[in-house]
Amino acid sequence: MMSKVIEKVGIFGATGQTGLCCIEHALKKGVKVTALVRDLSRLPEDIAPKINVINGNSTIKEDVLKAVEGQDAIIVTLGTRHELGFTTVMSDSLKLILDTMCETGVKPISVCLSSFLFMDPERVPQRFAEINADHKRMLDILQSPKYESLDWVAVLPPHIANEPSSNNQFKVNHGSSPGRQIPKWDLGQFMVECLNEPEHHHQLCGLAFPTLP
């Protein structure tokens, strides 16, 4: 069955580097963007007028509903900025987003996690252990039978580099990482494009440029 054309997308985590790249790519494609933003001061002045901005919190049901209802797809690039301690904010938020999608009939969603999830937890650097643990909770929630009707894509990037786009030269693997870094623009592009690419639905997607030899 042909996927529905995505004309409107809701983005959670829109003010981080990946979220902003997602916004840029979506706008370039002519997709209308709604962003749930907790701290409006973090939204660049040149971006704000081009999108629908909702001031709210991804852990509050009413705010999440405003960002999900009426959308064709959802993108989640939630992070903790520089906080590396114990947290369940990302996984709690994702569960609320997924429940709201089920209630409103929105099916496609891409979720940015980390390539650390391809590794044995004991090999993850200790300073990232708590963030990785919440990413694992996010992935477990995403893979729950409760949400099997959703067209989810788990995106597991390695180091996100502040490098120019590879111009579609990046590689995507299902179930493994093809390299050690990905330009942020490539990641933003994939987070948007994969929503309408059924071959990536229900997959753990590793992506990288340059790729490993």
Image: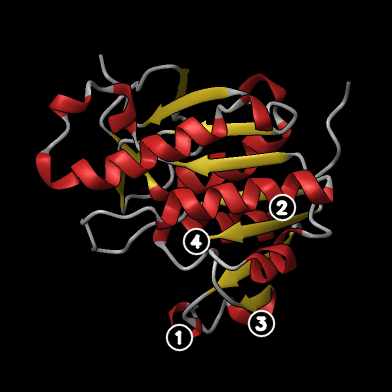
Q: Which mark is residue 49?
A: 3
Residue name at image x 12 percent, y 47 percent: 127
Residue name at image x 42 percent, y 26 percent: 206
Between discs 3 and 2, the one toward the N terminus: 3
Label 1: few (<14), some (14–19) or many (≥20) C-alpha neighbours in 10 Å = few
Q: Is 88 displayed left or right of 31 in the figure?
A: left
Secondary structure state at the residue bearing disc 2 = helix
Quadrant of res 54: bottom right
Where 143 sits versus 31, above or below?
Answer: above
Secondary structure state at the residue bearing disc 1 = helix
In the rendered image, residue 202, in percent from the top left (x then y), is placed at 61, 23
Between discs 1 and 4, the one toward the N terminus: 4
Q: Name the residue under label 2.
A: 100
Q: Is 158 displayed left or right of 109 in the figure?
A: left
Q: What's the distance in space between the residues labelled 3 and 1, CA to CA?
A: 13 Å
Q: Of 65 and 194, which appears nearest the observer?
A: 65
Between discs 2 and 1, the one toward the N terminus: 1
Q: Are marks 3 and 4 in contact (CB under 8 Å)?
A: no
Label 4: few (<14), some (14–19) or many (≥20) C-alpha neighbours in 10 Å = many
Q: Are marks 2 and 1 in contact (CB under 8 Å)?
A: no
Q: Name the residue under label 1.
A: 41
Q: Of 167 and 11, which appears nearest the observer?
A: 11
Residue name at image x 45 percent, y 18 percent: 173
Between discs 3 and 4, the one toward the N terminus: 4
Q: Which mark is residue 13?
A: 4
Label 2: few (<14), some (14–19) or many (≥20) C-alpha neighbours in 10 Å = many
Q: What's the distance in space between the residues labelled 2 and 4, CA to CA?
A: 17 Å
From this viewpoint, is residue 159 visible? no
Q: What's the distance in space between the residues labelled 3 and 4, CA to CA?
A: 18 Å
Where 14 sits versus 4, above or below?
Answer: below
Between discs 3 and 1, the one toward the N terminus: 1
